[in-house]
Image (cartoon, helix red, strand yellow):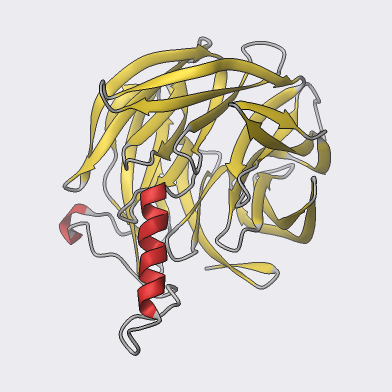
Amino acid sequence: MKTFSLLTKLVLTTLLFLSAFIPNQVSASTENVELDILNIEDIDVNPDRNYARGNNPSISVLDNGLVIAIKDYQGKLSYQLGEYKNEQLYWTYPEEYDTGQNPSVTVLDNGHILEVHDTGSGRLFYNLGRYEDGKIIWYRVGKQYDTGRRPDLITLSNGVVMEVHEGQLFGGGYYTFGRYDETYSTMNWFNVGNRYGGNIQETVIAQLHDGDIINVAEEFGRPSHIPLFYRIGSIGSYSISWSPKTQYDNGYLPSIAVLLSGHILEVHTGNSTDAWYRLGKREGDEINWYTLGGNYSKGQNNDLAVLYNGVVVDVHEDGNGTLWYNLGRQEGDKMVWF
């Protein structure tokens, strides 16, 4: 999931600053800004918005504004690049790069790509890549860093990576930190495998604008009406002090993103294959969920990313091995999906 790198934030801030001094040429609003990076012959245009066969999609945003989408399919991992134009995404064709399942992807502060996944046998691996001329060059492939399943990771504002995952058995949430080693072009993982709670599954994270972490997850071991809960974590010396967990809904497979406004967008699957969303903002150690937006799409196992212009990209499965995407933006106290 799903945050901008430090370089991207600096570039966007500079552009918005300059726009105030260039009337009629650059608008401070970026709603209509579009990219033109990928060659039109290299992309797949599908007005129905299904973009690949696969499962367990994950997305992030490169420094150049392109979306990178990772998924697994029949035990193999592949990626695609997406370009936002004309209120839709134009996708490259899938390119395989490894084997595994349940991937998660983030963009590091140097612009490189970090992907993590599990093997299905309780081991967690990572891959590193970089963008070059319309494709990803994977230069560090298949390195184990921990044990567990269904990882999720983000790049923090200080450049450190934070990863969370489920334990191998009986639930439980764990977190790990990592930093890119420029000398050896590898990841150095530290404070590996810190347990922060029991009865946790499908755990995901995002960083709030004030630097703290929000974690949402399912409660493990409940056969129906599975509680969804959140907690807020404060980072100190690469350990985290967590607030008590608070239930906010029932459902499955939550995902979360922090919008340009600093507000929180959460989506999850209901009792069928319907996707539901809500909007909230932090108030102390609690989240005020001020909009319960209801069902906005079919789909399950969603993942979210926020583009440079504030547009939200939501990718998800349909339950039959096909991946789809939705686009949306915050307008006041609601999401408008288009």
Q: Position of residue 165 (x, y in %)?
A: 59, 24
Q: How many marks?
A: 0
> Which quarter of the picture shows residue 150?
top right
Q: Position of residue 279 (x, y in %)?
A: 70, 58
Residue 321 can be seen in this image: no
> Which quarter of the picture shows residue 184?
top left
Q: Is residue 254 left or right of residue 2?
A: right
- Residue extending farthest to the bottom is 24
Residue 231 can be seen in this image: yes
- Residue extending farthest to the front is 237
Q: Is residue 18 left or right of residue 38?
A: right
Q: Is residue 55 left or right of residue 52?
A: right
Observer-nearest of 113 and 209: 209
Question: Can you say whether 206 is above or below 218 in the image?
Answer: below
Observer-nearest of 92 and 318: 92
Q: Is residue 322 left or right of residue 278?
A: left
Q: Position of residue 250 (x, y in %)?
A: 80, 41
Observer-nearest of 16 and 130: 16
Residue drawn 37% across the image and 78% down it: 19
Residue drawn 34% across the image and 80% down it: 26
Residue drawn 65% across the image and 49% down it: 267
Residue drawn 52% across the image and 45% down it: 316
> Which quarter of the picture shows residue 176?
top right
Question: Can you say whether 110 is above or below 88 in the image?
Answer: above
Observer-nearest of 338 and 179: 179
